Amino acid sequence: MRSLSGVTKEELASIRQWISDTIRPRWYASLPKNLGEAGHGKLKADQWRSALEFDIPVSAAQLWGDPSSPRHDLFRCTILLAMAIRFATSHKTSEQHISRYTHYMQEYLELLTKLDPTLRLHPNHHNALHLGDHLRRFGPMHGWWMYPFERVIGRLQKSNTNFKIGQ
């Protein structure tokens, strides 16, 4: 039986087990044990990066990496996104990094729409195609990404308010 994401419950259980059994560098954000369930809450941006750069591609390779797998295109889609993220979040920027990022992101979006022709792309998909311009103008993403603001927003969301400004 497939879930909404197209991943079966058995595949999701395997992914969770592989993630749980994996020893990763300490700078990689750990993922919730119940990844894929609504109960795990919202992932932080660093958890998403870690998951998409490492955990999910490794799991996808084990599930669908064999070229004869009927879902090999899903594996390719995952790897294209992981490669785009890797080039976008590198600690250095060059025309080659920007070119590679743009190439992988375009291929990812094309394959994504091929895998699901009913998929409607969102503004974030379009914005992702402009990221190369930002890397060219502002340098490596680590200098201007939004993690510090995300932390502040997280603290504010946990604050008790009565929705009355100044009271």
Image: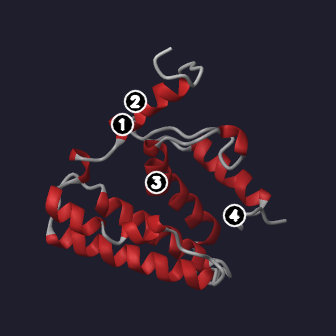
Residue ID at (36%, 36%): 149
**Above or below, 16 relative to 10:** above
Q: Nearer the viewer, mark 4 or mark 2?
A: 2
Badge 3: residue crowd in 10 Å (few <14, some 14–19, many ≥20): some
Check whether the beta carbons of the residues at disc 2 and disc 3 lie within 8 A of each other: no
- Which residue matches tag 3? 54
Q: Quadrant of residue 132?
A: bottom left
Mark 3 belongs to which amino acid? Answer: Phe
Label 2 secondary element: helix
Q: Residue 10 appears at what percent x and percent y?
A: 78, 58
The answer to whether residue 66 shows anywhere in this view is no
Mark 2 belongs to which amino acid? Answer: Val
Query: In the image, 106: left or right of 136?
Result: right
Check whether the beta carbons of the residues at disc 4 and disc 2 lie within 8 A of each other: no
- Which residue matches tag 1? 149
Q: Residue 148 appears at what percent x and percent y?
A: 33, 35
Q: Which mark is residue 152?
A: 2
